[in-house]
Image: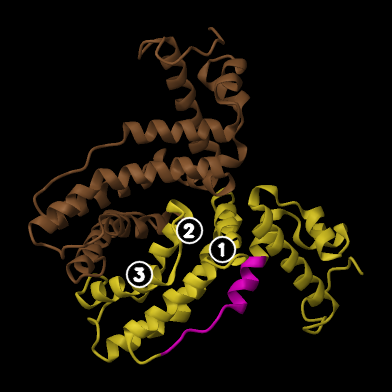
Chain colours: A yellow, B brown
Amino acid sequence: MSDERPEPGTVRPGGRTAKTREAVLRAAGDALAEDGFDRLDLAEIARRAGVGKTTVYRRWGTVPGLVADLLNEMAADSLPRTETGSLLGDLTAQARLVQSTLSDPRQGPLFKALITAASCDPQTADALHRFYDTRTEEWAPCVTAAIERGEIPAGTSPTELIRAVSAPLYYRLLITGDPIDGAAADRAAQAAVTAAKAGAFA
Amino acid sequence: MSDERPEPGTVRPGGRTAKTREAVLRAAGDALAEDGFDRLDLAEIARRAGVGKTTVYRRWGTVPGLVADLLNEMAADSLPRTETGSLLGDLTAQARLVQSTLSDPRQGPLFKALITAASCDPQTADALHRFYDTRTEEWAPCVTAAIERGEIPAGTSPTELIRAVSAPLYYRLLITGDPIDGAAADRAAQAAVTAAKAGAFA
């Protein structure tokens, strides 16, 4: 496998460089999910990915550089919003998506490790903020559609409302360790929609 | 300074052992707030506290053991609830207390480091959960009083409601990095109380 870093635009998507990136990011995600952020090691990730150490060091340089690239890929690959025709339906779907992600045996520990990494390094924090900005932007049209349907007051902040749905589920993941179940997801959506209808996010 | 670990009950509160503990926990909190969890080192904490390394290793053993003891002390010293006569008043006071803690230049980074430490170590996670259980129990009577006054439905879960107030503020600290200001605190309390009145936490 070549250690040359190609010029942008010189390698077709799905080519050898893309496959290397995919293997390394997959290995980084596995290592984060299994061992946590504090034991992440570029040489070990290269070994897991079946890629030369030099390739990993040359392309990503540092652990924060690699974690930031993983977050960029996760943002690019993240799932589209659900549109059900009602705000409660839409935000329940959002809450259920967050719930199934955070309670997944690989994804839950991975997100915990990514958030931990972000609190130890500014470059990772920037990448984490961009990831969540992307997710918020994806779901924001559900809020603007609800405003247009007259379900919630004009001037409701899509960002505040979308984040109010996610916050109780992340609180379980990071603070209390309580199970992140469907009931918790439905309650998070119901509470946020009720508050939004009363103008709490306007 | 003695390296003997005294039998329980043989040293009066405020004695030499208590002073050593206070100095070491203060130094551990300072180190966590300044440098983060990933650079915590028992020898450096002993130096900051002006205490022999052997004392620190013998009494606390490991970084997770020391961080757990710091969380125990924080739980024992944590502030009493505010009672204003209305649920919105009480939970706005709770939100403002969380907000002033998380936006404080020492306390904010300290809490971030403690939560990070908990996601890397099960002993620290247990101590973190006990700390937040203590805080939730302290504020729960505000919810039961509101049920007795008829402000919110009987069967409202104090735990769910108290945590719903805190969650959006911790989401800012750990996920988005947005400022944790008074407006965010007031909105968190208002949204949680509105949802509670509609039965979202029953």
Q: Is residue A73 magenta?
A: yes
Per the model, the C-alpha gap separating discs 3 and 2 is 14 Å
Q: Position of residue B20 (x, y in %)?
A: 47, 16
Residue picked out by circle 3:
A188
SS at badge 2: helix
Residue type, mark 1 in image: Gly
Residue picked out by circle 2:
A173
Q: Residue A38, can we see it?
A: yes
Q: Residue B108, can we see it?
A: no
Q: Is residue B64 magenta?
A: no
Is residue A28 or residue A61 the one in the foreground?
A28
Query: Which of the two discs, 3 and 2, labels the residue nearer the N terminus?
Result: 2
Per the model, the C-alpha gap separating discs 3 and 1 is 18 Å
Task: Please tell me which residue is depicted at 49% across the width and 23% down the height of the picture.
Answer: B24
Please give left or right for residue B133 compared with residue A41 in the image.
Answer: left
Say if labels 3 and 2 share a chain: yes
SS at badge 3: helix
Q: Position of residue A86 (x, y in %)?
A: 33, 88
Question: Do labels 3 and 2 touch, CB within 8 Å?
Answer: no
Mark seen at residue A170? none
Q: Give me the chain letter of mark 1.
A: A
Q: Give me the chain letter of mark 3.
A: A
Query: Which of the two discs, 3 and 1, labels the residue nearer the N terminus?
Result: 1
Residue type, mark 3 in image: Ala
Question: Do labels 2 and 1 touch, CB within 8 Å?
Answer: yes
Please give left or right for residue B58 compared with residue A46 in the image.
Answer: left
